[in-house]
Image (cartoon, helix red, strand yellow):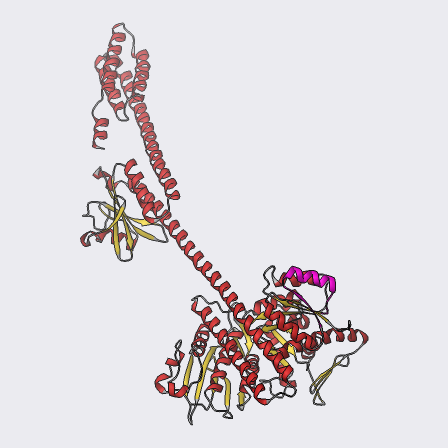
């Protein structure tokens, strides 16, 4: 005990808190609960959790504010819980420094997958600093250092922009990456009004990497928000 | 005014007094042998002095009178000097009269300015159409001698202000106010239009907007042809018009405000509804998942199937909630779509993924154009349309029958077809199913649950995008739902 990841849940609805707690405990992670934003912030400061699960609709303060205050010092993943139809809120939360989101209602499977991704990313970040540069999921293999991409063992040739796009997704594997984030990383901050670039290049990338680009296995669309590279 | 004119023309007592006085003075000095070289300037001074105190034109009487007296008194040898004196007097008197006239006009104008000022001050304070007109009428009737009437046009009615009320004008009295209101030109007496009327009618309004008419019956008939007088009333009518316009803008602003407030309220209501409904759904879904995990080993198939069906019901509830929320949003008239250029593949793929569990028992065929197709849309809404259509297709067709999705470009529109081999929709129901709370015939829906909202929200979403949606019976059985989206990119660059 003591080495299991610690997860802080900030959610005002008790039934959801209970279910989150039970679900998290099935993986023998440790859980801390907070009902309000303020309480969550002080718990985060005193316990320094490995992941924060944050409901965007808290009674005492705006979820975006909680993220901003946390991000002033806190670098571990923040996962947002929000409703469908609030894509703007999700994007705002991601821009403010959240790592990913879950759309209510979500299943336990989805929740645990997101938590795994968040924990893995943390480990991967540490690994990357040590030099790990090959990413693989299913039949897809991406070597960031040699800039080579393989699908089912066959090498696929990407244009420089396609590779850059894929590389950003690989570095955030399993996590949603907003259109704006991709645009900034790949095309630079000056092209902020060219959001359709991202979609067009993503379609091109899918044609090269996916067997059926209308039912993608790797490059998943998060409608209204951005893209996610599957990592399981 | 006739009286005033008379006052100017008939010699007044000060005039007569100064003529007599100056004649006596002249005779006395003349008897003492004073010559006209001295007498002239003295008389001139007397005339000027007296003229200043009499009404404009009367100064001439004094001047002419004294000049005649002097001609009669003076000797032959002095006639020349008297003539020069007479002409000088007339000239000076003329100048004085002119000055007096200018002063009189300035005075008149400042009086009108005072009325106008009082009017505008009062109008800016008053609110409400009737209040504005009543207060304008009160001030103007008190300050101005002429008879004024106010007409307001409401819809196709013409109302006249009587006392503090607006009363409908009789049919035969409508012509003039109506003409003035519609054309914005003055009419009636003193104009070239319908000059047989007994009053001058002026439009009540500003350059942008007219509200009715102002009629003027001048006390002095000559004023009908006085440009200045008409200008004053035109100014007054415009000023009242401006006040009415401001008032209307304020009312409109207030209403816009109300609408905006309503929208804000509705949105926050929707947000809290969405939150309140999702919370238990999330809780239930989670708990079922946990139960499933815990019962996984050594569990009977029956229990697992039970839980599976609860999960499906929940997913259905969640989808229905999305529909209800979208419908509520679309019912609120002013939906502003947040369109972005989206790739069709993204939206189709994501809808298919969202329904993957439900579609698992049907072979799915997706045909998209070879080139990347970008279409301006609010992607979450179009995804919702596709989810609804695919859900219907799965609901009303037997397992293992194929479901097809096709997207192509036809005549500047992106065309989406979702086709199934299900029970189909009766010909007479093809349009009805898109109405709210309407579904196919009972024998065709065989106890399949539905709210009758799915297709109506699809229709609302597609039409908001400027597209069309229709259901078409399919050859060999089943239904194709076809919808279109315009391809032109919005001009705002989004």
Point out the residue furthest to the top here: B32
Q: Quadrant of residue B453?
A: bottom left
Whether A33 is among the magenta residues is yes
A96 over A230 or under it: above or below: above
Q: Quadrant of residue B112?
A: top left
The residue under the point 72% across, 61% down is A45
Instruction: State which quarter of the image contains the C terminus of chain B.
Output: bottom right
The magenta segment: A30-50
Nearer to the camera, A144 or B193: A144
The residue under the point 57% across, 86% down is B303
Instruction: State which quarter of the image contains the N terminus of chain B.
Output: top left
Image spot of residue B402 (x, y percent): 50, 91
Q: In the image, is A153 to the left or to the right of B339?
A: right
Q: Quadrant of residue B221?
A: top left
Note whether residue B284 is visible.
yes
Q: In the image, is B385 to the left or to the right of B440?
A: right
Point out the residue furthest to the bottom here: B476
Nearer to the camera, B83 or A73: A73
Image spot of residue B336 (x, y percent): 48, 67
Nearer to the camera, B393 or B177: B393
B246 over B358 or under it: above or below: above
Nearer to the camera, B278 or B39: B278
Note whether residue B367 is visible.
no
Count of numbered circles in the view: 0
Image spot of residue B387 (x, y percent): 51, 80
B405 over B375 or under it: above or below: below
Q: In the image, is B186 to the left or to the right of B262?
A: left
Q: In the image, is B489 to the left or to the right of B135?
A: right
Image spot of residue B208 (x, y percent): 37, 53
């Amino acid at each position: 005990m003591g080495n299991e990841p610690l997860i802080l849940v900030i959610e005002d609805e008790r039934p959801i808190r209970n279910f989150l707690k039970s679900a998290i405990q099935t993986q023998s992670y440790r859980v801390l609960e907070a009902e309000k934003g303020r309480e969550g912030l002080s718990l985060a400061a005193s316990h320094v959790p490995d992941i924060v699960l944050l409901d965007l609709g808290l009674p005492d303060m705006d979820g975006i504010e909680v993220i901003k205050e946390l991000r002033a010092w806190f670098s571990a993943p923040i996962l947002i819980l929000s409703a469908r139809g609030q894509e703007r809120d999700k994007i705002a939360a991601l821009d403010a420094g959240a790592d990913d989101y879950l759309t209510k209602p979500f299943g336990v499977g989805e929740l645990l997958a997101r938590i795994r991704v968040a924990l893995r990313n943390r480990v991967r970040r540490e690994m990357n600093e040590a030099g790990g540069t090959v990413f693989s999921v299913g039949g897809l293999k991406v070597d960031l250092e040699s800039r080579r991409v393989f699908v089912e063992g066959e090498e696929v040739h990407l244009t420089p922009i396609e590779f850059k796009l894929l590389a950003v997704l690989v570095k955030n594997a399993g996590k949603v990456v907003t259109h704006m984030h991709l645009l900034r990383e790949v095309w630079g901050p000056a092209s902020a009004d060219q959001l359709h670039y991202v979609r067009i290049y993503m379609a091109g990338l899918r044609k090269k990497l996916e067997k059926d680009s209308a039912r993608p296995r790797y490059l998943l669309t998060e409608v209204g928000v951005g893209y996610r590279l599957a990592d399981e | 005014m006739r009286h005033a004119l008379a006052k100017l023309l008939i010699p007044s007592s000060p005039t007569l007094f100064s003529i007599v006085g100056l004649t006596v003075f002249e005779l006395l000095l003349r008897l003492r042998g004073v010559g006209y070289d001295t007498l002239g300037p003295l008389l001139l001074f007397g005339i000027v002095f007296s003229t200043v105190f009499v009404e404009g034109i009367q100064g001439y009487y004094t001047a002419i009178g004294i000049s005649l007296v002097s001609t009669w008194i003076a000797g032959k040898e002095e006639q020349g000097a008297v003539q020069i004196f007479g002409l000088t007097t007339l000239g000076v008197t003329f100048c004085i009269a002119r000055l007096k006239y200018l002063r009189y006009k300035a005075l008149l104008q400042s009086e009108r300015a005072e009325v106008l000022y009082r009017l505008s001050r009062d109008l800016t304070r008053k609110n409400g159409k009737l209040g504005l007109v009543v207060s304008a009428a009160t001030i103007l009737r008190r300050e101005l001698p002429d008879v004024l009437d106010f007409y307001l046009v409401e819809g196709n009615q013409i109302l006249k202000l009587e006392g503090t009320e607006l009363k409908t004008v009789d049919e035969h009295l409508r012509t003039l106010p109506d003409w003035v209101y519609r054309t914005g030109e003055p009419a009636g007496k003193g104009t070239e239009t319908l000059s047989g009327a007994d009053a001058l009618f002026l439009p009540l309004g500003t350059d942008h907007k007219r509200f009715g008419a102002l009629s003027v019956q001048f006390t002095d008939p000559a004023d009908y042809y006085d440009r200045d007088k008409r200008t004053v009333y035109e100014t007054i009518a415009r000023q009242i018009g401006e006040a009415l316009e401001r008032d209307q803008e304020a009312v409109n602003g207030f209403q816009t405000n109300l609408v905006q407030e309503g929208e804000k309220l509705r949105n926050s209501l929707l947000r809290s509804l969405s939150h309140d409904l999702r919370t238990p759904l999330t809780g239930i879904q989670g708990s079922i998942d946990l139960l499933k995990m815990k019962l996984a080993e050594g569990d009977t198939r029956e229990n697992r199937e039970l839980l599976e069906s609860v999960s499906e019901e929940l997913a259905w509830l969640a989808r229905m909630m999305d529909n209800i929320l979208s419908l509520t949003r679309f019912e609120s008239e002013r939906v502003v779509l947040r369109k972005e250029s989206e790739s069709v593949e993204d939206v189709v793929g994501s809808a298919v993924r969202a329904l993957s569990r439900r579609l698992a028992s049907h072979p799915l065929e997706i045909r998209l154009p070879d080139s990347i197709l970008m279409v301006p849309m609010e992607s979450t809404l179009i995804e919702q349309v596709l989810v609804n259509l695919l859900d219907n297709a799965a609901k009303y067709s037997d397992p293992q029958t194929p479901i097809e999705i096709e997207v192509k470009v036809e005549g500047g529109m992106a065309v989406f077809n979702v086709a199934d081999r299900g029970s189909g929709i009766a010909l007479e129901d093809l349009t009805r199913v898109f109405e709210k709370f309407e579904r196919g015939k009972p024998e065709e829906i065989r106890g399949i649950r539905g709210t009758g909202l799915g297709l109506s929200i699809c229709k609302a979403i597609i039409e908001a995008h400027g597209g069309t949606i229709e259901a078409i019976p399919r050859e060999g059985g089943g239904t194709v739902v076809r919808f279109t989206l315009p391809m032109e990119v919005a001009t705002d660059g989004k």
